[in-house]
Amino acid sequence: MIEIVHASSSWRDQERIIDYFDKVHAEDAAVRFLQALDQTIAFISEYPDLGNLWESSNLNSLDCDTAWSSISRIISLCIDVTTSVF
């Protein structure tokens, strides 16, 4: 098992996601998100060599705002699905 070290950007991203859940009054979804995040991090620390490396020559073109916008849309869809199912 390896030690996982969180970058400060990781904490900021988590805070933005939790703030969004709070904003839309989806506290249950926030708890489920944090539980899934903890489970995923534990899994990665136990199996760090799982998967393949992905090389890209285009790292400078990553657009964090676009990525965050996509994540926000996915979260919105998840909230809509969970509230309609339960």
Image: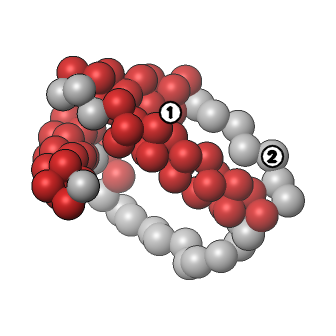
The image's mark for residue 3 is 2
Q: Residue at x 14, y 55 (%)?
A: 84
Can see residue 70? no
Q: Position of residue 64 (x, y in %)?
A: 26, 38
* SS at circle 2: loop
Q: Residue at x 61, y 47 (%)?
A: 38
> Disc 2 to disc 1, how far (Cα)?
15 Å
Q: Quadrant of residue 46?
A: bottom right
Q: Quadrant of residue 27?
A: top left
Can see residue 86? yes
Q: Residue at x 47, y 71 (%)?
A: 54
Q: Is residue 64 above or below residue 43?
A: above
Q: Is residue 70 left or right of residue 39?
A: left
Q: Position of residue 12 (x, y in %)?
A: 44, 23
Q: Position of residue 78 (x, y in %)?
A: 23, 53
The image's mark for residue 10 is 1
Q: Is residue 39 above or below residue 5?
A: below
